[in-house]
Image (cartoon, rainbow, N blue to C red):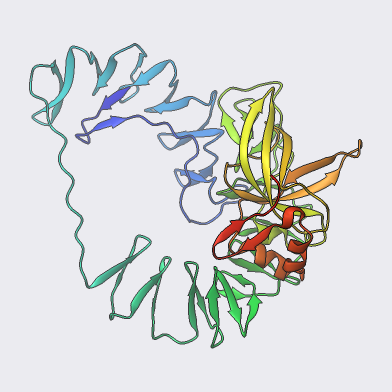
Amino acid sequence: MEIYTSNAYFLLTILFVFATPSGQGGISKGLSQLETDYCNSLPYNPVNQICCNEIIQTRSSAHTACCGQDLYITTARACCGGNKTLELKEDLSCCGSESFNRTTHCCCIKNDTLEVNLKDEECCPTPPKEAEKKSPEYISCSGINYKRESGLTQCCGKDLYSLSDVSVLCCNGILHLNVPEQSECVGGLIYTQKQLKMSCGSKIYDHHKQRCCSGRLYNESKAECCGNLLLEHNSNKICCSSSTHAMLYDTKPNHFCCGHYYYNVSLWSCCAEHLKPTPSHNSVHAEYRLKPLTDLIPDICHTTVLFGKVESVVLQNNWRHIVLRVIVKVSGISERPLLYVTLDHCSSPALENGMTYLWETNNNNNNNREYKPLSIPVDVTTDIHMFFTACNLNLMQALSVNTCSHMLHIQGGFSYQGNF
């Protein structure tokens, strides 16, 4: 469905996005940073509510949209501006407040007014975009423009620094300040006097006494991270997270997590972190969520775990069948280089082919080994070394007990020897 509007002389294709992040503003009570949109300065959850003409209204469907101050269902009708809607029909579109058939007519601008004309009549072209202007006096760091002071001016992610700055180190796109001399960034980790230092944003911290939540440091080791926020126990809040976002919500009845969304079961259903606009009485809710590897340390250090790469995934009868390649095991348990793992599809987190995760392994009631993913995808070139160092474990010893003599080459990737 295409809509023409007299306020902007462009052809707009409607894309209804039900949960758009609102930027990096303040966090409102009961709503997390990414969850919050604003309606007449009031926060609301766009998954379960909608703002029409600065009035917050409750969605009756996942396909609810605004047409002026009125609500309509996008699967049945289209909005032609104002409060006027028309029934969806093939090849029917809006031109201002009028409807027209796209096969025989087109929508044109004449004297600043939208008109429906026959297709053989000339219609307005889309104006070309202006070329971006670039100046050698300025430097753009992740979309933020700075004035270039000298030829030594460099970007580190979104921050600016000079190569002549002392006690400054750019590591993996993060600018670290007050770093001791002779510090080095190797594989995204900071080493001071050849010792690994855990960093949180631009600060060095003790992971046994403090908690780093996505670059934000807290003097609390027992609480749980939710993005850059701290989820305290018995706080009547819940953290919903995906591999890209983590958001904190006030708990509500009949609401569950689906990835980083917190949804009303009367409006949506969820399967493997995918929100679907079709409520289901038989919907299975997620049993747990994946966390960044640093959020799991040190609690996970003495658990039976392994780093495994997802080689292939197939879905059969609501079960996800995974071929998992063992990269390295943390304990001395005996594992084959390739494992066959089965997960309940809808209640398990979404996993990506070719990505490596930290997995927990346990024996079930039948004494069969079960595997459960714990972390979001890890960086095999840095995270494995970081995990062993932070947990005070011996990486080379772990490699030596791996079956099939797995050999780890941090800079050149991984190679394996043995029978597959």
Side of 222 where 270 appears, left or right: left
Q: Is residue 41 above or below residue 61?
A: below
Question: Which of these two is toward me, 90 or 354?
Answer: 354
**Residue 414 at x, y percent in the picture:** 60, 57
Q: Quadrant of the C terminus?
A: top right
Q: Is residue 193 above or below residue 148?
A: below
Q: Quadrant of the N terminus?
A: top left
**Residue 183 at x, y percent in the picture:** 55, 83
Asked whether residue 166 is in view, the answer is: yes
Question: Which of these two is toward me, 252 or 273?
Answer: 273
**Residue 116 at x, y percent in the picture:** 16, 18
Asked whether residue 220 is in view, the answer is: no
Side of 366 where 34 appears, left or right: left
Question: Residue at horizontal 28%, vertical 81%?
Answer: 150
Q: How many marks?
A: 0
Question: Residue at horizontal 60%, vertical 66%?
Answer: 216
Side of 210 where 277 appears, left or right: left
Question: Which of these two is toward me, 41 or 171?
Answer: 171
Question: Which of these two is toward me, 191 or 259?
Answer: 191
Side of 213 where 296 appears, left or right: right
Question: Residue at horizontal 62%, vertical 85%?
Answer: 193
**Residue 152 at x, y percent in the picture:** 32, 81
Where on the picture, by quarter, is residue 81?
top left
